[in-house]
Image: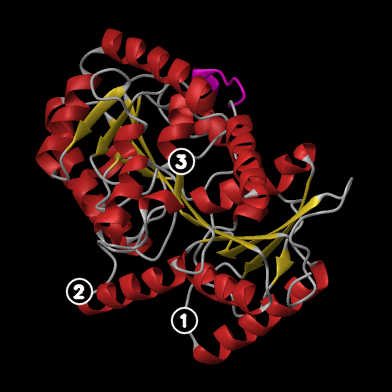
């Protein structure tokens, strides 16, 4: 036994206990992965408890929209915002949950949970500590001074972390370039998504209030600065000049929702703002292309879901997006520039045969590489290797 009463290894026939900690379950890749792992690892001999803070006002709640019966232990103060008092309460609550659950592994997701959860795990003597980088906040989020501080904190935490998971090779390489940790600490485990339900294209468009004719470009995600909806709208204005019946569908919400709504008025009915949707299969069934316009990403789940649905992607070359969209094969990868983004969208919108070929290739590649069962198995293998080392 170690401090806090946690066993280094489970006894014979005893499940491996994993305490998973995430700052908040807002719609996005970290929440989706936490949900899949919490449910899926039970079949591999693991018992998982999931801790999460509250979703911020204006954010979409993943649990409410996508997984309403997912068991989550709420931790007051463990949200997105940094507040000394709230963070301290969250830290104390996490320590209390560790002592109650007595996990063999603490696995944290997202930056704030990674800080509080890993420190708590060290102080309570949890033998295996894992953190997943679903991306990073070293570009496009903070001032240079704050970014340097964040990097320093991550370096210090990495020294007390048993293993680090990166969702893609480029994400790992960017973290290595920032001196966050050693290469041998990292394991690359891409996200995994489920096959979508089959939905008739015409029915999907009718349900979403879209015309049955004309090409549809789909954006799914948070309406926040790093996603660069301003770049997307600028690019789509050019698309409309060249593909007059094209429509941009924006499915999501966020702190820039009003700005996006105001900026989109100049494009009139060419832009449809849907807000968050519960039926994602319907969204992808309606689309000819899916687009990412961000300045920074991890491995975008939107691109994975689109690929599973057989929809080609156009994405800026950020994070590990290019590990999902194989340029020229399953979509197009371009620099983070409105003109380049527009040209790529026009190129594919004007070539239905090429889109069809790319869509089939995307689906084949996604099924082979990005399934949810593979995600669960990869984590089960990692956990076993860490417990046995």
Q: Up-down: is 186 above or below 193?
A: below
Whole-angstrom CA distance, mark 3 to mark 2, is 28 Å
Q: Which residue is mark 3?
A: 301
Asked whether the residues under the numbered discs 1 and 2 touch, taking CB atoms below 8 Å apart as contact, a structural biologist would say no
Q: Which residue is mark 2?
A: 144
The answer to which of marks 3 and 1 sits earlier in the sequence is 1
Q: Nearer the viewer, mark 1 or mark 2?
A: 2
Q: Is residue 170 left or right of residue 286?
A: left
Q: Which residue is mark 1?
A: 82
Q: Residue furthest front?
A: 389
Residue 28 visible in image? no
Q: Label 1: state its secondary structure.
A: loop
Estimate the x, y position of residue 338 in percent, counting from the top left.
14, 43
Estimate the x, y position of residue 44 in percent, counting from the top left.
76, 38
Q: Label 3: state its secondary structure.
A: helix
Residue 370 or 104: which is nearer the viewer? 104
User: Which residue: 35% across, 49% down?
Assistant: 172
Quadrant of the drawing holding the N terminus: bottom right
* Residue 327: quadrant of the picture: top left
* Residue 106: quadrant of the picture: bottom right
Query: Badge 2, how many Cα within 10 Å: few under 14, some, many 20+?
Result: few
User: Which residue: 64% across, 66% down?
Assistant: 52
The answer to which of marks 1 and 2 sits earlier in the sequence is 1
Residue 72 or 277: which is nearer the viewer? 72
Q: Nearer the viewer, mark 3 or mark 2?
A: 2
Q: Label 2: state its secondary structure.
A: helix
Asked whether the residues under the numbered discs 3 and 1 touch, taking CB atoms below 8 Å apart as contact, a structural biologist would say no
Q: Residue furthest bottom?
A: 85
């Amino acid at each position: 036994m170690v401090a806090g009463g946690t066993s280094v290894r489970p006894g014979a026939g005893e499940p491996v206990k994993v305490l998973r900690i995430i700052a908040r379950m807002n719609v996005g890749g970290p929440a989706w992965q936490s949900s899949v792992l919490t449910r899926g690892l039970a079949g591999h001999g693991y018992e998982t408890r999931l801790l999460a803070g509250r979703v911020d006002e204006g954010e979409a709640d993943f649990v409410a929209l996508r997984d309403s019966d997912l068991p989550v232990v709420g931790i007051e103060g463990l949200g997105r915002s940094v507040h000394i008092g709230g963070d301290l309460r969250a830290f104390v609550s996490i320590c209390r949950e560790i002592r109650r659950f007595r996990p063999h592994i603490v696995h944290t997701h997202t930056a704030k949970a990674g800080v509080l959860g890993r420190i708590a795990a060290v102080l309570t003597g949890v033998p295996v500590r894992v953190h997943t980088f679903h991306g990073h906040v070293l570009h496009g989020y903070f001032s240079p001074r704050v970014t340097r501080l964040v990097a320093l904190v991550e370096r210090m935490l990495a020294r007390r972390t048993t293993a680090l998971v990166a969702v893609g090779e480029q994400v790992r390489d960017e973290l290595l370039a920032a001196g966050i940790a050693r290469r041998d600490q990292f394991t690359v485990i891409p996200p995994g998504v489920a096959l979508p339900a089959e939905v008739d294209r015409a029915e999907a468009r009718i349900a979403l209030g879209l015309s049955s004719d004309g090409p549809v470009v789909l954006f799914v995600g948070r309406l926040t600065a790093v996603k660069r909806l301003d770049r997307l709208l600028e690019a789509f204005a050019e698309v409309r000049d060249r593909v007059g019946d094209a429509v941009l569908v924006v499915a999501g919400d966020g702190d820039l929702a009003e700005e996006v709504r105001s900026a989109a008025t100049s494009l009139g009915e060419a832009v449809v703002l849907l807000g968050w949707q519960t039926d994602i299969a319907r969204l992808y069934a309606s689309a000819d292309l899916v687009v990412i316009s961000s300045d920074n990403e991890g491995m975008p789940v939107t691109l994975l879901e689109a690929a599973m649905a057989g929809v080609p992607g156009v994405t800026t070359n950020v994070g590990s997006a290019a590990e999902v969209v194989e340029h020229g094969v399953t979509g197009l990868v371009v620099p983070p520039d409105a003109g380049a983004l527009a040209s790529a969208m026009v190129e594919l919108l004007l070539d239905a045969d090429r889109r069809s070929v790319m869509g089939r290739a995307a689906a084949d590649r996604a099924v082979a590489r990005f399934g949810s069962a593979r995600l669960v198995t990869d984590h089960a293998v990692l956990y076993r290797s860490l417990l046995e080392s």
